[in-house]
Amino acid sequence: MSFYVSVISYVGIYGILAMSFTLVHGTAGMFTVAHAAFFGIGAYGTALLTPLLGPGFVPVGIVAGSLLAAAFAAIIGLAALRERGQYLMLVTFSVQIIFSVAALNLPFTGGDNGIGGIAPLGIGGLTAKHPIAAMVVVLALVVAIYFLLRYIERSSLGRLLRAIREDEYAAEALGADVFAAKMFAFVASAGLAGFAGAVFAHHASYINPVSFSFEVAILIVTISVLGGQYSLLGAIVGALVVVWLPYVIDFLGIESVKVSAITQLIYGLVLIFVLFIRPSGMVPEQLRGFHPPAQPGAER
Amino acid sequence: MAQAASAMEAASSGISLIGVAKSFGGVAAVRDCTAEIPFGCITGIVGPNGAGKSTVFNLICGFVAPDAGRIVYRGENIAGLSPPQVFRRGIARSFQGVRTLRNLSVLENLLLGATAAKALSRVWLPFVTRKADEAAVPKAWQLLDELGLTEAANRLAGSLSYAEQKLLAIGRLMMADVDMVLLDEPLGGLDPNGIDGFIARIHSLVERGRTVCVVEHNLNAVRRMTDRVIFMADGTVQASGTTGEVLAREDLARLYLGVTAAKGSHP
Ligand SMILES: Nc1ncnc2c1ncn2[C@@H]1O[C@H](COP(=O)(O)OP(=O)(O)OP(=O)(O)O)[C@@H](O)[C@H]1O
Ligand SMILES: [Mg+2]
């Protein structure tokens, strides 16, 4: 029972992570491979900070972890987003590698062993120690973030980001500050990935570099592409399908050393299959339909 | 801002290019270019392929920074500003290709004309954003009706025919809150039947108080649309004046045909 509960929580956490990727990639069209690193920066950020703040300050740690990820993204964005084309992918690829090396070797990250004993989710005297309570907190955060991102996607800014995805010169000619809009999408998305990482740290109570490796970067892309890379709902559906996979393989009684390899193989096949058969994934981009003004209730 | 420029301004100003130059590597795309695009009339820019016409638009709108010279608009040197900065001062342009936002709906393409410039600064104020976004919608519907694209409103813009996409590109500029509209070959690739409708659309831009400047190879259409013509060749202005005057000059006609025939077409 508590096993299922914790898997549902992970679906929620990876759902948030995948939605953050939808914002930067599906909506704004920027392919970044550093989202596992931003996820990790948020996790390590709060894991290192909350013990200094004392119990009851978990939300502060989570916000700080998110802001730290956003700050790193801002620096990377300033350096990489002025260039057009594939530059960002190369830069974020390096960032992901550097992060993994840093997480293993910095004096305060605990190397291979990572950091344990992280305070559970909670605020002040209230802690969600029970798995069901933790799951409820995570799912509430998923809903809140879904609606926040939906507001952005449906606003003129979301439309502008999609315009930039389609043709940045056209967007620029219509008066858009393309660099600023890209910075917004990149930094907000990284901050959100950091947020997911911080929640992950408090939920798991233990983190190590494996959770933020390049394989996780691939996992994020897999979730997004399978679920629907242009859709927020798709990100959640993708997480729902993908997060179960290793547990299912494990359940089949396959040797645990092989589980990771088999999982990676299946991710790869799924990616290829979806991209060829149905690039929009399980949930396609939903265009907002408009009713002509003559009809009552102007829009749906 | 988009209201008709005052009579004083109409008589006295617009965009002035003064000694503007731009080279790409060894190619002098534009050199010592001095020209006026006055408010209140339609100016045509004509000339053979590679004359530097599109580069002039790129220079004015900030897509390319000049090596030398000044571009004065409303008393300010706008040379070297970024495209959004130029847009905010009231100048918008279309491209030689259609640059349709293919995976956005037709209506959304139009809405962007009205909202793209302010979308980012407003997003922090959800209420203001919603109001401003909604305000653009009826305007877009009205424009769709005028362009004959009502049926296609919620379809992907990429599914439109080429001619419809060219209309949409002009529609986006009609939505924009600017005074000056620069059109780069709006009639290019259209069949003769479509052209009349297009010229009507360009005139409806003027009716909306916009000053229009158009680069166009179809001289017949230029004769019908424009009041003034700037003739460019080899990156510089060879002549300018009223349309009748400039297009009647045989030396220019020979220059046009000669260079066009020699160089062939150019994207
Ligand atoms: N971004 C660029 N990089 C390099 N060369 C360029 C660039 N833009 C223009 N040129 C060159 O500058 C010259 C003028 O080009 P431009 O596109 O302004 O001509 P045009 O008058 O618009 O021609 P057309 O009628 O064929 O559109 C050409 O020789 C072109 O190859
Ligand atoms: Mg041109």
Image (tube, coloured by chain):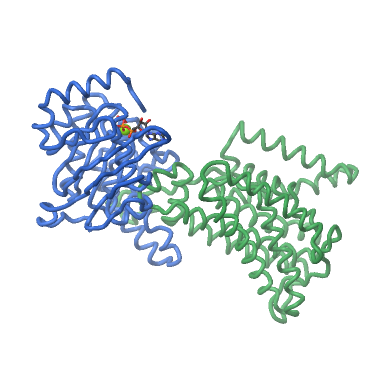
Chain colours: A green, B blue
Residue B56 visible in the shown view = yes
Question: Residue A192's x, y, as percent?
Answer: 61, 60
Q: Which residue occupies the foreground of this view, B75 or A55?
A: B75
Q: Nearer the viewer, residue A197 or B187?
A: B187
In the displayed structure image, the side of residue A245 where residue B2 appears, left or right: left
Residue at figure coordinates x 27%, y 22% from the top left: B259
Residue B135 percent coordinates (x, y)? 31, 58
Task: Specify the quadrant of the image occupied by residue A189.
Answer: bottom right
Front-most of A243 and A92? Answer: A92
Observer able to see residue A1: no
Residue B6 is situated, as x and y percent measured from the top left of the image, at: 13, 57
State which quadrant residue A77 falls in.
bottom right
Looking at the rendered image, the quarter that the C terminus of chain B falls into is top left
Residue A269, above or below B204? above
Q: Is residue B183 above or below residue B49?
A: below
Q: Residue at x 78, y 42 (%)?
A: A263
Q: Quadrant of residue B191?
A: top left
Q: Quadrant of ligand 2?
A: top left
- Identify which residue is drawn at 22% across, 48% down: B16
